[in-house]
Image: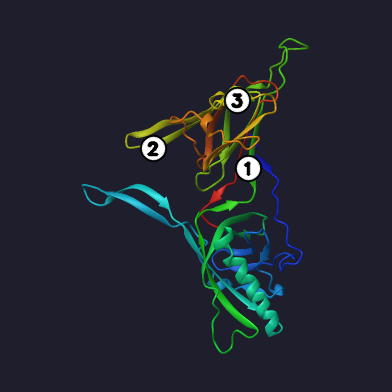
């Protein structure tokens, strides 16, 4: 089953902002060649590897791009040692050194102030985004908040036309997110008479069992869009997990019933979107449909790395009934 990659929208640069000219390439120790761009909370683009703009990354000091940090919960083993009960990913901190310079003092100060505002405004306006692009065209992003470091060296040779800052960027979600969205579409086909004009089979079974491949290093939490007609929709995943007594089959599911919010069956073309993290259910007009799920039994499951056996069961479906699944892969490293 092919996975359809949806087009990726690039944030437009501000015409009056340094960075409209694109980014260069930097060699980051242990991570290879990359083009690095920072997007502030307003979406303005700040290339960090284009020296002609008046600043550049000091690659030798970059750190925090590797695997996410974890906190381990363990239980003592009666025969010695311990057993791992749970591993919880922790926020990461990225260290990013930048050198800023200008042809004269006023040009230097203007650039220094612009970059300082671009990073520190994350504490007021929400996270910025650090993006690392590889020569093969792949790009991974992570949300960042300014923590500290924009002070400068404060020596006799700095602060006039050049200075360095060593940024600490706090990342609440330690995983890197692929900018390329994976999309899976399943739609009810037009039924055919089995014998007219010749023996044939309708494509209506595409809303049944589906294999979804998740190329991520970790679990991803997808969003689902259901398009009517449909009176009841059930989403089920079946997994094989290793337990204390061997491998066991685990099934998780949730059901969407429009009648639970007083709407009745979805009509042709009506849409509802279910997000799994954080849990959210929205009808097409933006109204809250969280009550349409079968609480407390509902489990808004994620897609584990590798192959996921998923079933979409639509009651009251017809021509045009569809389910769209979208997610962005998540990785341990940049």
Mark before the other along the chain sequence, 1 or 2: 1
Q: CA distance from mark 1 to mark 2?
A: 28 Å
Q: Is residue 102 visible?
A: no
Q: Height in image: 48 above or below 86?
A: below
Of the image marks 3 and 2, the number of the one nearer the N terminus: 2
Residue that mark 2 sits on: 242
Q: Nearer the viewer, mark 3 or mark 1?
A: 3
Q: Is residue 261 visible?
A: yes
Q: Tell me the element at label 3.
A: loop
Task: Assess whether mark 2 and mark 1 are in contact (beta carbons under 8 angstroms).
Answer: no
Q: Position of residue 114 (x, y in %)?
A: 65, 71
Residue located at (71% from left, 69% from top): 18
Residue at 54 percent across and 39 percent down: it is 280
**What residue would you read off at disc 3?**
263
Q: CA distance from mark 3 to mark 2?
A: 42 Å
- Residue for badge 1: 182
List x then y, in percent, for residue 88: 41, 51
Quadrant for the C terminus in the image = bottom right
> Residue reaching furthest left?
78
**Image marks 3 and 1: residues in contact by CB distance under 8 Å:** no
- Residue 240: quarter of image: top left
Secondary structure at badge 2 equals: strand
Q: Is residue 327 left or right of residue 137?
A: left
């Amino acid at each position: 089953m092919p996975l359809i990659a949806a087009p990726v929208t690039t944030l437009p640069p501000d015409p009056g902002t340094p960075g409209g000219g694109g980014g260069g390439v930097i060699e980051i120790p242990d991570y290879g060649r990359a083009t690095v761009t920072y997007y502030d909370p307003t979406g303005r683009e700040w290339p960090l590897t284009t020296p002609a703009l008046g600043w550049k990354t000091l690659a030798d000091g970059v750190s925090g791009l590797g695997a996410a940090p974890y906190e381990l919960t363990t239980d003592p083993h009666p025969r010695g040692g311990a057993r791992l009960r749970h591993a919880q990913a922790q926020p990461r901190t990225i260290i990013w050194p930048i050198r800023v310079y200008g042809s004269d003092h006023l040009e230097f100060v203007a650039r220094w102030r612009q970059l300082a505002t671009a990073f520190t405004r994350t504490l007021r306006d929400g996270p910025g985004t650090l993006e690392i692009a590889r020569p093969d065209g792949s790009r991974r992003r992570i949300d960042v908040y300014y923590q500290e470091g924009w002070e400068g060296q404060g020596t006799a040779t700095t602060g006039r036309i050049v200075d360095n800052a060593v940024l600490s960027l706090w990342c609440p979600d330690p995983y890197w997110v692929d900018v390329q969205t994976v999309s899976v579409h399943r739609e009810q086909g037009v039924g055919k008479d089995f014998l007219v004009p010749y023996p044939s089979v309708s494509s209506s079974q595409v809303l049944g069992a589906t294999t979804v491949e998740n190329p991520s290093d970790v679990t991803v939490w997808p969003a689902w869009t259901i398009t009517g007609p449909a009176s009841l929709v059930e989403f089920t995943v079946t997994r094989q997990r290793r337990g204390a007594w061997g491998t066991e089959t685990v099934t998780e599911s949730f059901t969407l019933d429009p009648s639970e919010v007083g709407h009745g069956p979805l009509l042709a073309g009506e849409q509802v979107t279910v997000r799994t993290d954080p849990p959210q259910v929205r009808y097409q007009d933006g109204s809250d449909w969280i009550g349409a799920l079968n609480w407390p039994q509902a489990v808004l499951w994620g897609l584990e790395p590798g192959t996921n056996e998923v079933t979409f069961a639509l009651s009251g479906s017809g021509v045009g009934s569809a389910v769209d699944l979208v997610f962005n892969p998540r990785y341990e490293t940049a």
